[in-house]
Amino acid sequence: MEELLLEIHGIAQGGDGVGRVDGLVVFVTGALPGEEVLVQISERRPSYARGSVVEVVRPSPDRVAPITADDGHAAWQHIAYPAQLRLKEQIVREQLAKLAGLSEPPIAPILAAPQPWGYRNTAHLHVEGVKVGYHYSGSRHVSDLEHDPLLLPALNVALAGLREVLPTFKSAVEGVTLRASAAYGYAVGLLHGHNRSSPADLADLGAAWMARSPILAGVAVDSPGYEQPSPVDIHEELGGVAFILSPDTFFQVNASQAGRMLEVIREQLDMQPGESLLDAYSGAGVFAMPLSAGLKQVVAIEENPSAVADGVRSLPYNGIVNVEFIQAATERALPRIEGPFDAAIVDPPRRGCHPAVLEELARLAPARIAYISCHPGILARDLGPLLNVGYRLDLVQPVDLFPQTPHVESVVILRK
């Protein structure tokens, strides 16, 4: 294997350190700006190479000891938290400059997480025999997980109970989804079967798991032909609204930081009584419902039927009557909507907006848009068409939704 001694001068969007040798850009997993590292090259292309740290010859003062050996899902745990925040701001700034041509974007200081550890309310784990955990990086093998410091305490308690009962049912399940309520402190589970799974075995595993883990309010089974005898739901709160959620419905994984995102959107959109709001890629209405008070109408578009069903059944629970859910892909639904809308929220998946969505937003021309992004590069790409039709960029608010990882959320405000 080829090894190089490198000075690291920058940080890439994906979290790797960046160095150069003989004009070749080298992306180095596990390296920090300012460090000298010995790198093992795993991939070499004409214009770039990739590798990982073999030895830190001269460490950065921002380097700290990781607290867990499995760093695949906590890839930045070797970076002191203040430095994580600084680097995430830098990534957002560099991507907007490089890809959107914005030399001085209005970036506010990143909103730090009050809990840099123990914040995640969701975990999607794989099962391999008696092992339960995440896949090793670049592998289909499961890294056995006894405790995940990123998870809310209730999920680690539930995980411990699953590990105790799993040996008896090790052939029944191939994966598990763990969900916890940050508002109420309990957990639910969803067992995923494989082609050879017996629904009865999965149900027995769920019953044994619940008996071992009183913190579980229910365990659902995901297996063809299995009918759940009673609903398994989790209740969560955000912005004064209570959500009733199925175990597989997406919800922001960091509830406290999602609340801060909501407050940024509420303040910046400044919705007035009688106005109309469009919420594209709405999920279960995590932003649409808390912002609906006093508005004439809110139209929430979401493709996932489970999320829409959960949003619809949460409406009467909160006495909300002015939110309409449309279950469809946003790019298919928007051409059929006339508006007008005074403001819009756009919260697409990591791949960003379909081009047709940006075209339809230009047609509907809401006066204010809040674009929520978890990928600075994709955000920079999607801003272009909106800036070209007369929107101005008023605010970029980075939010550290995922501490100990290179991921950064941004709330962007655009105005006509």
Image (spheres, rainbow, N blue to C red):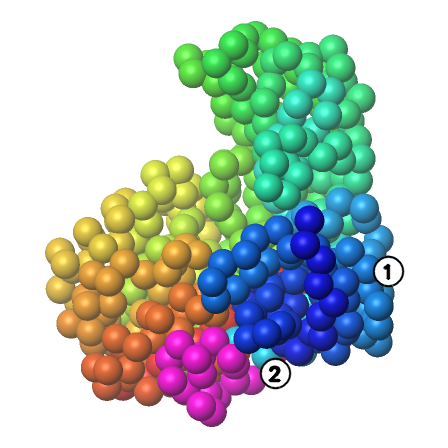
Point out residue 53 in the picture as x, y percentages from the top left corner: 74, 58
Residue type, numbered disc 2: Pro
Residue 349 falls inside the magenta stretch? no
Helix, strand or loop at label 2? It is: loop
Q: Is residue 14 above or below residue 329?
A: below
Point out residue 372 in the picture as x, y percentages from the top left corner: 44, 67
Mark 2 vs mark 1: give the one in front. 1
Residue 367 seen from this side: no
Point out residue 401 in the picture as x, y percentages from the top left corner: 60, 63
Q: Which residues are the magenta region?
A: 93-112
Q: Which quarter of the rendered picture does the C terminus lie within?
A: bottom left
User: Neighbour class for label 1 at 10 Å: few (<14), some, many (≥20)?
Assistant: few
Residue 90 seen from this side: yes
Query: According to the image, label 1 marks what residue?
Result: 65
Q: Is residue 334 above or below residue 125?
A: below
Q: Nearer the viewer, residue 37 or 317?
A: 37
Q: Nearer the viewer, residue 316 or 397?
A: 397
Q: Is residue 335 left or right of residue 132?
A: left
Residue at far bottom of view? 104
Query: According to the image, label 2 marks what residue?
Result: 109
Residue 108 falls inside the magenta stretch? yes
Q: Which mark is residue 314?
A: none
User: Neighbour class for label 2 at 10 Å: few (<14), some, many (≥20)?
Assistant: few
Q: Quadrant of residue 232?
A: top right
